[in-house]
Amino acid sequence: MTTTATTRKTPVKAATASFMGSAVEYYDFFLFGSAAALIFPTVFFPSGDQAALVMSFATFGFAYIARPVGAVILGHFGDRIGRQKVLMFTLVLMGLSTFIIGCLPGFAQIGWFAPVLLVLCRLAQGLSAAGEQAGASSLTLEHAPDSRRSFFTSWTLTGTQGGQILAALIFIPVVALPDDIKFSWGWRIPFWLSAVVVIVAFFIRRSLHETPEFEQAKATGQIARMPLIPLLKNHWRDVLRVICCAFIAAVSTVFGTLAIAYGKEQGLAASVTLWLVVVANVVALFTQPLFGKLADRVGRKPVFIYGALSSAVFMPFYMLSMGAGNDLLTFGLAILTFSCGYAAANAVWPSFYGEMFSTRVRFSGMAIGTQLGFLMAGFAPSIVAALGGGSAGGWVVISVFTAIIAVIASVSALTARETKDVPTDQLGLAAERRVPATV
């Protein structure tokens, strides 16, 4: 492996750039989720009832339709021209589309054109997000030392939590505004602020060089002209495995969007429901790197499976606590469910999924697999809301849904190789050499 100045491994810098880029991307992404629960049913639809809430959550899900398309496109270029260049593009696209959302007229001004324009902007957000986590995870994994890949790549998803915290913190004063201000121009301010954070992250990410693994593959002529072909030929089982494992991301969207609406129905103030998200994600900033370190010691599979199954176990207690009248209990269970349960799977998947693929198809494999799996996460709020998850007794629907996806993700993870001891330059080569996998 060449170790020139342009191709040296810089894991801390890569993790920092991935953290900041993911924070910006998912500030924008989760800001939309909070607005879909609390603002958009009133602003972009003809009524503020349950039907408007379901339609609003559907706009949230539309980004997940664009994400598989974006995964194929951005994955191709990420494996062809490099991870860093594609990540710069995704950052600008997300920031621009989010700023435009803050400028859109509402239903009262242009009727059904308002939600149509909202969906178009959401599709652009989806295209951007399709390449962000896969690209950032690939870049960080390839910069990290072999023995600490899970720890360093966990910072990509910790950045995602940072973005969700920032989105909720900025939205808390918005929901406290008088209705005439909140539903006219107040809700727009957080979307406009996206331009500021994008500029900051742009300059941080611009200084990061390409990964040594990619540069080595490029220098030795191993870059695939059409990465999708070797991916589907040699790694189709891994793609299917990632799709099913990625269902677990639905826990995050249910926790961060639908639970807000359910909490309101149970009598919690909107500010309290947003603080639940903030506190759980703040704690996850600390627990996720610890889960990443644990996975470097005991393996990716046991930590991922624990995160999936514990989410299913804790979710019904969390949902029931919202109607118990004890905010301290609700906050404690929010931390247990998200920060001590789901965070384990969330921290580990960047290394767990990325290590299934070789350098020449890693970006494509992660992007396509995760984005197809994330379709479940994207439409989970609207599906569960349509089944009554946002109304009285909805905790049963939410809990059963969480249990089903957790079991699917866990069973899929059990079929994967354990890769914690495989050198980075050997990752994914077993599939390409058609060597039988050992579970």
Image (cartoon, helix red, strand yellow):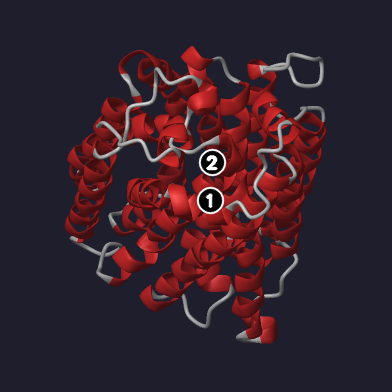
Crowd tier of the residue under label 1, counting other residues whose Cα lies within 10 Å: few below 14, some 14–19, many 20 or above: some
Residue situated in front as seen by the camera: 176 or 80: 80
Q: Mark 2 — residue? A: 164
Asked which secondary structure carries label 2, the reply is helix
Image height check: is 173 above or below 149?
Answer: below
Residue 121 appears left or right of 408: right
Type of amino acid at the residue the image marks with label 1: Pro
Q: Residue at x 60, y 26 (%)?
A: 142
What mark, if any, has residue 216 been given in the picture? none
> Mark 2: which amino acid?
Gln
Question: In this rendering, does residue 32 appear at all?
Answer: yes
Percent x, y for residue 278?
48, 36
Q: Nearer the viewer, mark 2 or mark 1?
A: 1
- In the rendered view of the protein, which quadrant contains the C terminus? top left
Please say if 277 is above or below 49. Answer: above
Q: Please report whichever mark, 2 or 1, sits nearer to the chain's N-terminal start.
A: 2
Pick the front one: 98 or 123: 123
Q: Residue at x 75, y 63 (%)?
A: 100
Reply above or below: 102 against 246: below
Which corner quadrant of the image does residue 386 belong to? bottom left
Quadrant of the rendered image containing residue 43: bottom right
**Image quadrant in which the N terminus is located:** top right
Q: Is residue 412 left or right of residue 295?
A: left
For the point 41% across and 52% down, which residue is it? Answer: 236
Mark 1, residue position: 230
408 up-or-down from 331: above or below: below
Q: CA distance from mark 2 to mark 1?
A: 35 Å
Q: Quadrant of residue 17?
A: top right
